[in-house]
Amino acid sequence: MEDSVAIEVEKPPLDHLIGAAVKANRILAGLTLAELSAKAKVSPAMISKIERGQVSASLSSLEALAQATGVPLINFFAGTVDVTDVSFVAAGEGMTVQRLGSGFGHVYKLIGRAEASHVNFETYNVTLEGPLPPRPLYQHDGIEFIHVTHGEMVYRCGEGLYHMRPGDSLSYDASTAHGAIELKTDKVRFITLVAKAVSG
């Protein structure tokens, strides 16, 4: 089997990276160009040029835009950093991070994680084998997504019960009580992604 090789991608120019970050933070703040212009006292035309990477914005302009969008100035330079939080896991691999029950084969494998300035996520490949032991439902911070790849189960989320089959997905606020309560097949596999806010 051939080793996986990371593909080197040419980095966009600095002005484009900063412009994209300004636009992304403006959208996250729910501001139009005109609204950001009024708050930052920078003309809409100039903001538009900055967002498209057509001009090299001054630090004073970027600082005004950062204050107007409610983010630290450094956020506009996050994309210029060469080191990013990236993980690659080859097929069939992953780190076993949790095993519940000595004889039930409940295996959680961490297959991906990343963290940015305001959010992080972890992805697990979960295998459940019957019978399910009695256990409380889960509740934790963040939002969660699950996607069934093999087998069938009844999954509880709050007051709802969902008969999930291969290809079915479920997304929810992870503070809601959730978890598998019945396996309809001997084995169930699903991918789950948990995203949480990072306190600054």
Image (cartoon, helix red, strand yellow):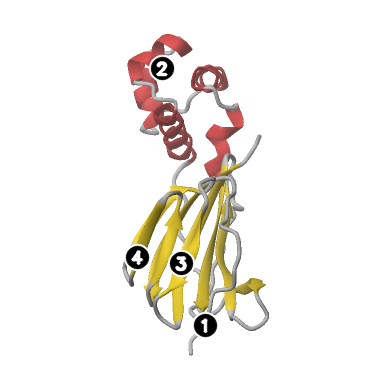
Residue type, label 4: His
Q: Do the residues labelled 1 and 3 touch (CB within 8 Å)?
A: no
Q: Is residue 53 left or right of residue 139?
A: left
- CA gap between label 3 and label 4 equals 16 Å
Q: Is residue 109 above or below residue 86?
A: below
Q: Are marks 4 and 2 in contact (CB under 8 Å)?
A: no
Mark 1 Cα shell of 10 Å, populated few (<14), some (14-19), many (≥20): few
- CA gap between label 2 and label 3 equals 40 Å
Q: Earlier along the polypeptide chain: callout 2 or callout 3?
A: 2
Q: In this view, does 71 lie above or below 153?
A: above
- CA gap between label 1 and label 4 equals 39 Å
Q: Do the residues labelled 1 and 2 touch (CB within 8 Å)?
A: no
| Residue 3: image tag | 1
Q: Mark 2 points at which residue?
A: 36
Residue type, label 1: Asp
Query: Which quadrant holds residue 190?
Result: bottom left
Residue 184, position in %: x, y?
39, 76
Q: Mark 4 points at which residue?
A: 163
Q: Mark 3 points at which residue?
A: 191
